[in-house]
Amino acid sequence: MMIIDTHAHIYPDAIALRAAKSIGEFYDIPMCMDGTLSCLLERGGEAGISRFLVHSVAVTHERVQSINTYLMNTAAEHGEKLIGFGTMHPDFPDHRAELQRIKDGGLHGVKMHPDFQHFYLDDENAIALFQAMAEMGLPALIHTGDFRQTYSEPRRMAKVLDIVPDLKVICAHLGGWSVWSEGWKHLAGRKNLWVDTSSSLYAISPQEAADIIHRYGVDRVFFGTDYPMWTPKEELERFMALPLTDEEREKILHLNFEKFMADLEK
C-alpha cells in the first residue's frame, strides 16, 4: 500500500540538529531523529513510506525567503519523493509577492506555526495573509492547539474560517495538540478543513484517536509523523493500531491526500 507522510519538518544539514533540539526544548520532548532530509528518506523508506510532505517554519519574517528557497530547491531535486510547502509570517512585508514566488517555485502550500512564530491566528495581519492565500489557491498547514498558549487556539482557527471561508486548511495534530476535544468541537464539519494525525497518537488512546477521526470524517484525515519528533516506524505502528477498517486506513494513509492535491490542480 502507498503511504504518504503529510507532516515532516526538514532543515539544511548544517543546522538540522540545532533546529531539532530547539523543537524538543519547546515541547519538552526529546527528538527521535536529527531533522535532515537524508535521515527522513532513509528511516521513512525503511518504514514503507513512499512520499513526504516537507516543510519548515520561519520563526521571524526575515527568514521567510531563505527557507522557501531551500524548500524549493530540495523539493525540485527530489520530486519523486517530496511534496513541498513553503513558509510565511504575518509580519512579512509583501505577502503576495512571496506567495507568488512560492507558487512559481513549485511549492504547493504554506506551513505556519503560530506558537513558534508568536502571532494570533485571528490577528489582522494573519487574516490578510490568509485572504491572499485563499485568493491564490494556496492551502495552509497550521499547527493548531497548545494548552500552554493561546496563539493557535482552535477557536481562533474557527474564526479565521468564518472570515476566510475559501481558505483550505490542514490543521495539524488532529486539530488541537494537547487540546484534542477542544479541536473537534470548534472545527469538525468545516467544508475546507482537514486534519493530520501527527503528534497525537502518542498521547491519546487508540479508541479516542479513532473517535476523533470519525468526528472529522475519515475523508478529512491525513497520516503524518511530525518527523523529527518521532521515528516514521513508531508513528506508523501507532496509526496501524487504531481500530479502523482497512478501507479507512487506506484513505488516511494516501487516498485522501492524493485527492486533496488533485483538487488543488483543478
Image (spheres, rainbow, N blue to C red):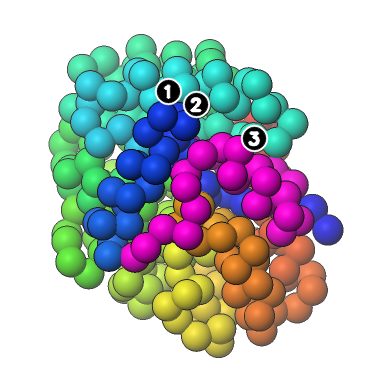
Disc 3 element: strand
Instruction: Name the residue that disc number 2 marks.
Output: 71
What residue is drawn where x is 17% and y is 59%?
150
Instruction: Name the residue that disc number 1 marks.
Output: 68
Specify the amino acid type for callout 2: Leu
What residue is drawn where x is 79% and y is 74%?
246
Specify the amino acid type for callout 1: Asn
Residue at the extreme right: 1
Query: Are the residues flagged by discs 1 and 2 in contact, CB closer than 8 Å?
Result: yes
Q: In which image quadrant can residue 180 be found? A: bottom left
Q: CA distance from mark 1 to mark 2?
A: 5 Å
Crowding at label 3, few (<14), some or many (≥20) Cα neighbours within 10 Å?
many
* 70 to the left or right of 129: right
* 156 to the left or right of 6: left
Question: Is residue 49 within the magenta segment?
Answer: yes
Instruction: Name the residue that disc number 3 marks.
Output: 82
Position of residue 174 measured from the top left corner of the image (x, y, whole percent): 46, 65
Q: CA distance from mark 3 to mark 2?
A: 10 Å
What residue is drawn where x is 26% and y is 31%?
89
Depth check: 142 or 139 in front? Answer: 142
Magenta-drawn segment: 29-55
Disc 1 element: helix
Q: Is residue 218 above or below residue 46?
A: below
What residue is drawn where x is 59% and y is 44%?
39
Crowding at label 2, few (<14), some or many (≥20) Cα neighbours within 10 Å?
many
Which corner quadrant holds the N terminus? bottom right
Q: Is residue 159 above or below residue 90?
A: below
